[in-house]
Amino acid sequence: DSGVTQTPKHLITATGQRVTLRCSPRSGDLSVYWYQQSLDQGLQFLIQYYNGEERAKGNILERFSAQQFPDLHSELNLSSLELGDSALYFCASSARVAYSGNTIYFGEGSWLTVV
Amino acid sequence: AQTVTQSQPEMSVQEAETVTLSCTYDTSESDYYLFWYKQPPSRQMILVIRQEAYKQQNATENRFSVNFQKAAKSFSLKISDSQLGDAAMYFCAYRSPDGGSQGNLIFGKGTKLSVKP
C-alpha cells in the first residue's frame, strides 16, 4: 500500500458526461501528480500541483482540469467525455517538489470507461 | 527533450533464474534520477528501485539490482531468483533534477515479464 488513495476505483459513464476523480496523497506529501495510462499512449503526465498551486502541466486536454485543496487532496475533472478518454488515471504524490529526487508514489488508479 | 527506451516489449524467465531488463535514455543533463516501476496485473504502479545519477554505485534492493552505465545512458534491471510474483509490466522512468516540464517522470513503454514455473 503506497498510502495514496484514489476514488472511485472503477467508473463507467457515457460520452458527453463529466466525472470527477479524487485523490488523497500520502500523509505529509505536498505534491500531487495526475497521470493517464491508455493502451495506445502509454503513461502520460497530465498535471502536477504543489501545496495548492499548479506546478507543471503536461498533455492535459482543455476538457480536463484539476485542483488541489487546502487539505492537499486533489480532484481531476474530466468533461465532455469521449470514447478515447477511456483509460486508467493515476494519482501520485511526493514529499517536496524542491527536491526532485523524491520518489513519486502512485495510487491504485481509477479505471474510467466511456461508453 | 528526454526520452526513455525499453527495447524489449516482452521477456520470459524460468522461476529461480535471473533475468535482465534493458533501458536506455537520452538526456543532455548531467544530474538526474532513474527509477524502475513494476505494474502487476492489479495495475498498481509499485516502485522497485531508484538510482541517482551522481552515484557511481549501482542500487540494490534485495533480489533487484541495476546496472547503471552513465556514459552509455543505460539503466538495466536485474532480477535474481525470479519468483512467480515478479510477473508484471516493468517501466523504466527518468526524472530531471529540477522536476522538469514533462511531468517529473518520463516513462518508457514497458517490458512485460512472464515467469514460468
Image (cartoon, coloured by chain):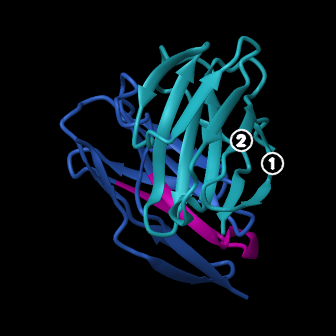
In the rendered image, the vertical position of residue A75 relative to residue A107, given as above or below: above
Front in this rendered view, residue B67 or B74: B74
Q: Which amino acid, mark 2?
A: Leu
Query: Residue at label 1?
Result: A8
Extent of the magenta region: B75-92
The chain under label 2 reads A
Relative to residue B81, is residue B60 drawn left or right?
Answer: left
Relative to residue B4, is residue B89 drawn left or right?
Answer: right
Q: Earlier in the sequence, mark 1 or mark 2?
A: 1
Residue at x 46%, y 20% (from the top left corner): A55
- Residue most extreme to the front: A16
Q: CA distance from mark 1 to mark 2?
A: 7 Å
Q: Residues within 10 Å of mark 2 (few under 14, many from 20)?
A: many
Residue at x 28%, y 50% (from the top left corner): B3
Query: Residue at label 2?
Result: A21
Tag 1–tag 2 contact (CB < 8 Å): yes
